[in-house]
Image (cartoon, helix red, strand yellow):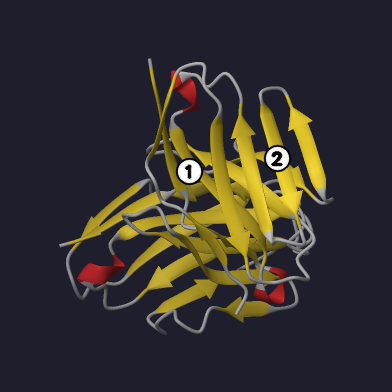
Amino acid sequence: QKEVEQNSGPLSVPEGAIASLNCTYSDRGSQSFFWYRQYSGKSPELIMFIYSNGDKEDGRFTAQLNKASQYVSLLIRDSQPSDSATYLCAFPGGSYIPTFGRGTSLIVHP
Amino acid sequence: DTAVSQTPKYLVTQMGNDKSIKCEQNLGHDTMYWYKQDSKKFLKIMFSYNNKELIINETVPNRFSPKSPDKAHLNLHINSLELGDSAVYFCASSRTGTGEEKLFFGSGTQLSVL
């Protein structure tokens, strides 16, 4: 069964620091990975996706994919209190259905 | 216009009742999904449906059934509700269902079974 593992946290970082969120996945054939952010009481929203090995940057967010080691990371630079949320990684699982990790709760304190 | 809309937002009901949650998408997407999110934020697939195929997560009790009157709608019907069914249920859609594209989520339905 294709699975993705995430540390549930919470991960607590001070404002202005770099927050590092990680996922490991079981299926070596997986090609694409997604990071969703979910604020409390809201629905998940896509913030990053990555298909290729290496880094992909979008503003303060950087997604990193290492297929050999089967992990994907999300770095948030200059973390702000408004970044406090649950971050979910996802990939196409069985029957190509988006499969989510358990999510990491991030707390950015002033 | 809301891309994926689901109703109701809150649903409080007694054990043993039957209830439905409605979902509609106006994006012209081919595939729709139902996810269940537990209190620990784990988002678990229940059903995936496009106009050709229904894929059911085998762990979902058969008290849950998806009903799709047309491509833009995927409703969730639940029979004989149990306490453990209490969760947030999210409807979502994607353009083709390849798994390599963005999911658009509804706002969620908080189900509380008393």
Residue at disc 1, secondary structure: loop
- Vertical position of residue A63 compared to residue A24: above or below: above
Image point 45% across, 17% down: which residue? A15
From the image, tell me which residue sits under label 2.
A63
Chain ID at mark 2? A
Discs 1, 2: same chain: no
Spot occupied by residue A107 in the image (x, y as percentages of width and height): 39, 31
Q: Residues within 10 Å of mark 1 (few under 14, many from 20)?
A: many
Spot occupied by residue B107 in the image (x, y as percentages of width and height): 48, 43
Q: Are marks 1 and 2 in contact (CB under 8 Å)?
A: no
Image point 53% across, 78% down: which residue? B57
Which one is in front, B89 or A86? A86
Q: Amino acid at mark 1?
A: Ser
The reply to whether residue B106 is visible in this rendering is no
Image point 64% across, 78% down: which residue? B54
Cα–Cα gap, marks 1 and 2: 26 Å
Image point 74% across, 71% down: which residue? B51
Give the left or right position of residue B61, taking residue B101 as reference.
left
The reply to whether residue B67 is visible in this rendering is yes
Spot occupied by residue A92 in the image (x, y as percentages of width and height): 70, 64
Task: Check the picture and name the quadrant holding the C terminus of chain A.
Answer: top left
Q: Amino acid at mark 2?
A: Ala
Task: Check the picture and name the quadrant holding the N terminus of chain A.
Answer: bottom right
Which one is in front, A108 or B94? A108
Which one is in front, A81 or B92? A81
From the image, tell me which residue sits under label 1.
B107
Chain ID at mark 1? B
- Vertical position of residue B56 compared to residue B113: above or below: below
Residue at disc 2, secondary structure: strand
| Dot in front, 1 or 2 | 2
